[in-house]
Image (tube, grey):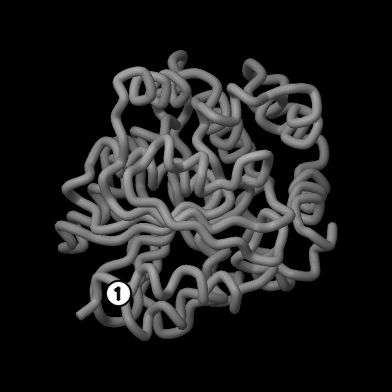
Amino acid sequence: MQDDRLKDLFPGFQTETLHVEGAEIFCRIGGNGPPLLLLHGFPQSHAMWHTLAPRLAQDFTVVAADLRGYGASSAPPGDSGHNAYSKRTMANDMISVMQRLGYAKFAIAGHDRGGRVAYRMAFDHPERLTRVAVLDILTTYDYWQRMDWQRGLRMYHWLFLAQPHPLPERLIACDARNYLEHTLAGWTKARSLDPFGEAALEHYRAFFIEPARIHALCEDYRAGATVDMEHDTADREAGRKISLPLLAVYGAAGFAGGERTPGDVWRDWAKDVREAAVDAGHFLVEENPDATYEALHPFLMEDVS
């Protein structure tokens, strides 16, 4: 449930909470035109899109949703197989949300964990999508395959959050706000909280300190280390590729860079890949909203007559 004490970052947008199998999904809806689903990542919520959503809503009907366990969506308990927080389950959540809103097909843009939901949806439900944009990620498969000591130090949270319950939950709960702010600042190019703005930070702080949500975030990463990796591996070994147009937008100082460009890596997974670099760290939407918009908008507009 949305906290009414928080500043409304989406003026003019409607609020909906929709029941799906095993969860309740909160979203904000605004604009006119073809439907566009926006998904956030860790450790944020739909609030991360507040700088871009009004601009995108000039051409699209924008649905900015909270993933299960995040923001104002419900946080169901985890299970032994971590299926409750698999990207397949989260993708199914969003298919149901868009169906109930009346959208049989839609475009999707996802940052971080939301990007993982987006590409899983492109594998599992290609008939429901028109195109997909992933922001500052490679596949779960690629990150685990490349996890050497250097990447492990930089992306320690993949290893830490995936540890068995309740170790990471208890450690984060000791000072959840500090952990959140350390993570947000540390993944920007400037190593600062300045790009986020106080109102957005309050949205992130409000849900991150709740024990049920801390557990949900850990379950998200436990799924990444188990069932999500299994799903990616099955697609890779079967030679399946995403047939939809895919745009990989990434921060030049973010997580997706490396010896090969993100676009080159995504060409192993998709048939029609474009890429665009943004002068930012991992949180490119808030660090450099203008450049992110300029990368996303033309790609999304290709389907608009």
Q: Is residue 129 left or right of residue 301?
A: left
> What residue is at 16 percent from the left and 47 percent from the top?
127
Q: Mark 1 — residue?
A: 61
Q: Is residue 278 left or right of residue 175?
A: left
> What is the x, y in percent for residue 73?
44, 50
Q: How many marks?
A: 1
Foreground pick, 290 / 60: 290
> What residue is at 64 percent from the left and 68 percent from the top?
286
Within the image, what quadrant is residue 195 found in? bottom right
> What is the x, y in percent for residue 209?
68, 46
Amino acid residing under circle 1: Thr
Foreground pick, 36 / 243: 243
Quadrant containing the C terminus is: bottom left
> What is the x, y in percent for residue 29?
35, 71
Instruction: Tell me: residue 214, above or below residue 57.
Output: above
Q: Is residue 45 left or right of residue 299?
A: right
> What residue is at 44 percent from the left and 26 percent from the top?
228
Is label 1 in a helix, a strand or a loop? strand
> What is the x, y in percent for residue 272?
34, 51
> What residue is at 82 percent from the left and 49 percent from the top?
182
Instruction: Tell me: residue 138, above or below residue 164.
Output: below
Q: Residues within 10 Å of mark 1 (few under 14, many from 20)?
A: some
Confirm whether residue 72 shows in the render: no
